[in-house]
Image: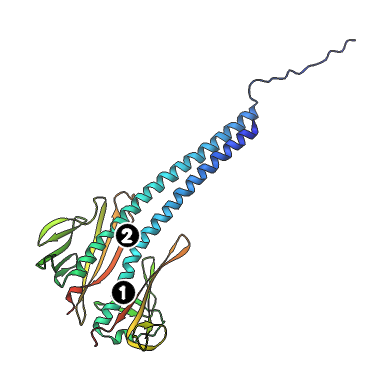
Amino acid sequence: MMVEMLVAISIIAVSILAATMVAQKSIYVSRQAFHATQAAFLLEEGAETVRILRDNAWTNISSLTPGANYYPIFSGGTWVLSETANVVGIFTRQVSVMNVNRDNITKDISTIGTDDPGTKLVTVTVSWIEGGATVTKTLQFYIMNIFSQ
Amino acid sequence: MKITKLTIKNHQNGYAVLELLFYMSLFSVLSLVVISAMITMAKSFKETAIQAELVQSGTIMERISREIRASYDINSISASNLVLNTTDDSGANKTIEFSLLDSDIRLLENGIFTGNLNTSKITTTDLSFVSIVTAEGKAVKIFFTVRSENDASGRAQDFYNTVVLRGGYQ
C-alpha cells in the first residue's frame, strides 16, 4: 500500500514540477523574443548611424581605427561614434569597422589582395543580459564611398 | 490461584492519530504544490500574452521605418508628428503622416486617416521624431514607448530606430 502511494505521489509531483518549469521557460522565451525585436531595431539604427556618417563625409569612416569598438551616441542633432561605452536601456551597442581587401584580378572582395580604401566591413553588435546569460545579436555589412567625397 | 491472561484486542479497522496526521499533512503539502503550480502557470500565460502584444507593437516601428526609407523628403516634422513626401505604386506624389493622438499612433495617407498602427490593447506614449540632415540627404530618428493594457504593473518598453530617406539620394 505504502509503495503504491509513494509511486503515485512522486509521479504527480514530477508532472506538476515539469509543468511549472515549462511555464517558467515560456516566460523566459517570450521575454527574450521581445528583447530580440527591440535589439533588431537597435542594430538597424547602428547601421544607419554608419550610413549617416558616410553621407556626411567618407573620412568619418576611413578615420576609424580598424577593429576598435565604437558606441553610437546622438549628439548635436546627428549620430556620432563615441569611444566611451554607453547603454540603451538594458542593451549595449557597439560598432566596429574592418578594412576590406579586393582581389587584384577580379576586383572582388576577398581575404587576399590589395586593401580597398573605399570599402569597409562594418559590424554592429547589440548585447544584453537575459536570465543571467549574455545574448548577442550581430549585423554585418559593407559600406562603400559611393559619393566619392 | 488462577492466573488470568490479559489479551490485547487488535483493532484492524480505523486510523491511528499518527496515521491521520501523516495523511493530512501529505494532502496539504500536495494541494499547496498544485495550487502554486496553477498560479505560476496562470501568471506565465498572462506574461506570455503581454510579451506577444509587445512583440506585435514592433510592427509599428517596422511600418514607420519602411515608409521613411521609401520617401524622398520630409514635408514637416515636429516632436510627435511626421509628414513624409513619398510616391505611390504608380509614381504619383503622396504624403504619409504619422501622429500621436490619445495614446494611438495614427497613419494618414494624403491627409486621410487610414488607421491606428498599434493594436487596441497597446498604449503608446512618447512618440518622438527628430530630423537629421546630412550632406547627401536626410534621416529621421524615431522613438516611442509602448505599454500593454493587460499589464497590471504597467511596464514601459522603448523602441528606437533611425532611418535614412533612401528616396532622397541623388
Image point (51%, 36%), residue name: B31
Locate residue A33, reporting x and y percent.
38, 58
Q: Foreground mark, 2 or 1?
A: 1
Residue B11, x across and y down, in percent: 69, 19
Residue A109, given in percent of the width and then of the height, sits at 36, 82
- From what the image shows, is residue B129 above or below residue A58? above
Give the CA separation, mark 2 to mark 1: 22 Å
Q: Quadrant of the C terminus of chain A?
A: bottom left
Identify the chain of the residue marked 2, using the numbered disc in the image: B
Above/below status of B120 relative to B108:
above
Residue A49 placement (x, y as % from top left): 29, 76
Please, which residue is most extreme toward the top here?
A: B1
Which residue is found at the position 39% from the left and 65% from the top? A90
Badge 2 element: strand
Q: Can residue A79 be seen by looking at this rendering? A: no
Residue at the limit of the structure toward the right, as seen here = B1
Q: How crowded is mark 1: few (under 14 residues within 10 Å), some or many (20 or more)?
A: many
A122, above or below A126, in the image = below
* Amino acid at circle 1: Ala
Q: Quadrant of residue B133?
A: bottom left
* Residue A47 numbered mark, or none: 1
Q: Quadrant of the N terminus of chain A?
A: top right
In front: B35, or A1?
Answer: A1
Residue drawn at (45%, 50%), measured in percent from left and top?
A24
Q: Which mark is residue B157?
A: 2
Mark 1, secondary structure of its residue: helix
